[in-house]
């Protein structure tokens, strides 16, 4: 039985290289891109609204009111 010739880059090495590229790309982001996009006023305002869709979800899933 003949052995198949080994490829230059195996499957594991390929995925390891992809992970390395992703880590370098994430680390090279500029500080401006990582800055917080919300102001203090936006952080403090209420976001939850009990709309008709939310009320229907609670009713259908039998949450106590």
Image: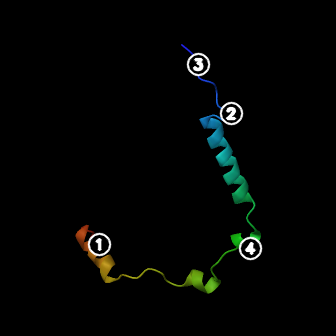
Closer to the camera, 49 or 53?
53
- Give the mark, 4 or 1, whose residue is nearer the N terminus: 4
- In the depicted structure, whether residue 25 falls above or below residue 10: below
- Give the mark, 1 or 2, whose residue is nearer the N terminus: 2
- In the depicted structure, whether residue 40 falls above or below residue 18: below
List the residue tagged with mark 2.
8
Residue 25 lies, in percent from the top left, at 71, 58
Query: Any mark on residue 3, and which?
Result: 3
List the residue tagged with mark 4.
32
Res. 65 visible in picture: no
List the residue tagged with mark 1.
57
Closer to the camera, 4 or 43?
4
Between marks 4 and 2 in the image, the one whose residue lies nearer the viewer: 2
Q: What whole-number distance in Å separates the C-alpha atoms at marks 4 and 2?
A: 40 Å
- In the depicted structure, whether residue 27 falls above or below residue 31: above
- Give the mark, 2 or 3, whose residue is nearer the N terminus: 3
Q: Mark 2: few, some, or many residues within 10 Å (few <14, many ≥20)?
A: few
Q: What element carries label 4?
A: helix
Q: What whole-number distance in Å separates the C-alpha atoms at marks 4 and 3?
A: 53 Å
Q: Residue at the top extreme?
A: 1
- 36 horizontally vs 48: left or right: right
Instruction: Report the residue at 27% width, 69% height from top.
Output: 63
| Residue 5 quadrant | top right
Q: What whole-number distance in Å separates the C-alpha atoms at marks 4 and 1?
A: 39 Å
């Amino acid at each position: 039985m003949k052995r198949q010739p080994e490829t230059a880059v195996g499957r594991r090495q390929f995925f390891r290289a992809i992970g390395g590229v992703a880590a370098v790309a994430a680390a090279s982001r500029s500080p401006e891109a990582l800055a917080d996009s919300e102001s203090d006023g936006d952080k403090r305002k209420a976001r939850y609204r009990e709309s008709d869709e939310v009320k229907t979800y609670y009713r259908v899933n039998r949450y106590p009111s």
